[in-house]
Image (cartoon, rainbow, N blue to C red):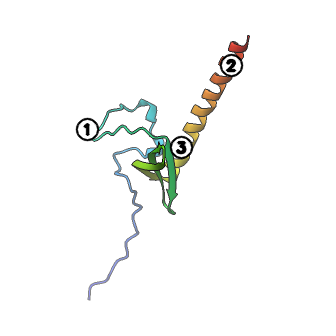
Amino acid sequence: MPKRTERKAEKTSAYPRNLPSPQSVDVSKLERTQSPNYVYVYANHANVSTTTIDVRLVFGQMMLLPHEGRIEDSASVTMTWEHAMKLRDLLTNVLEARAETVKRLSAAASN
C-alpha cells in the first residue's frame, strides 16, 4: 500500500485572489450605474425585521381614507448587519446635517 502524505490545508478566501477585498475598496471612486431593474418607490412607512445574519427593511405607503386605512408594502431591502450599521451611520450624518440647516434657517428667519 502506498504511503499517504499529509498536505497542509491551504488558506482560502471567499474572494478571488485577483480582486481586492471589499474592505479595501474606496467606494467613492467607483462608477455608479443604474440597473435596468432599478425601481423607484415612495414610502412614508417603514418596518424592520431581522435574523441572525441579516436585516430586512420593508417600505410602504400609509393610505388613510375617511373610514379606513391600510399600509401598502411596496418594496423591501435585505442587507447584512455590517451594511445596516453603515447605513445607520450614513443616515445619522444626513439627519444631523439637515437638523443643523433647519436650525440655521429658523434663526435667520427670526432675525
Residue type marked 1: Pro
Residue type marked 3: Lys
Residue at which label 2 appears: 106
Of callouts 1 and 2, which one flags the residue occurring earlier in the amino acid sequence? 1
Distance from label 3 to label 1 (Cα)? 26 Å
Residue at which label 3 appears: 86
Which residue ends up furthest to the bottom in the rendered image?
A: 1
| Quarter the C terminus occupies | top right
- Residue 87: image x %, image y %? 52, 42
Residue type marked 2: Ser
Residues under numbered marks 2 and 3 in contact, where contact means CB atoms less than 8 Å apart: no
Q: The residue tagged with tag 2: helix, strand or loop?
A: helix
Q: Nearer the viewer, residue 6 or 37?
A: 37
- Residue 82: image x %, image y %? 52, 50
Residue in the picture at 51% in, 63% down? 52
Q: Residues within 10 Å of mark 1 (few under 14, many from 20)?
A: few
Q: The residue tagged with tag 3: helix, strand or loop?
A: helix
Residue at which label 1 appears: 36
Of callouts 3 and 1, which one flags the residue occurring earlier in the amino acid sequence? 1
